[in-house]
Image (tube, grey):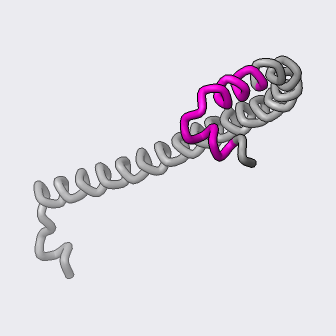
Amino acid sequence: MGLFNNGLKGNVLTGLAIGIGAAVVAPALLPVLSGAAKPIAKALIKGGLKLYEKGKETAAEVGEVVEDIMAEAKAEMAEETQQEANPPTPEETV
């Protein structure tokens, strides 16, 4: 513990020892880490693709609903315009 207490306060030799140790250990750890990282990365990509497809489906459904509402609103507006152009006669209101 004394090595780290002094090394983190500016001891150059401790920094060099840690760097050299990391350089020696890294080649042994990289294959292990890359072997574990590939399945994780693949799972993340698959999840992202599924989420993207679900988003596309949801956007299409929302688009259809908006189109239906717009069509209904246009039909109501056309009906109102037609009623304003042709007001009912007194016989029709009874």
Instruction: Name the foreground residue: 73 vs 58.
Output: 58
Tell me where residue 24 sits by quadrant.
Answer: top right
Estimate the x, y position of residue 76 in percent, counting from the top left: 29, 57
Is the residue 39 above or below the residue 67 in the image? above
| Identity of the residue drawn at 55% across and 41% down | 9
Q: Total of numbered circles in the picture?
A: 0
Q: Is residue 18 magenta?
A: yes
Give the main secondary structure of the magenta stretch. Answer: helix
Estimate the x, y position of residue 78 in percent, counting from the top left: 24, 51
Is the residue 71 above or below the residue 92 in the image? above
Estimate the x, y position of residue 23 in percent, counting from the top left: 76, 19
**Taking 40 as reference, is 32 left or right?**
right
| Identity of the residue drawn at 79% across and 35% down | 40
| Identity of the residue drawn at 75% across and 48% down | 1
**Taking 12 as reference, is 18 left or right?**
right
Instruction: Name the foreground residue: 42 vs 64.
Output: 42
Image quadrant in which the C terminus is located: bottom left
| Identity of the residue drawn at 52% across and 42% down | 59
Residue range corresponding to the magenta coloring: 4-21
Is the residue 50 above or below the residue 28 in the image? below
Is the residue 33 above or below the residue 59 in the image? above
Tell me where residue 21 sits by quadrant.
Answer: top right
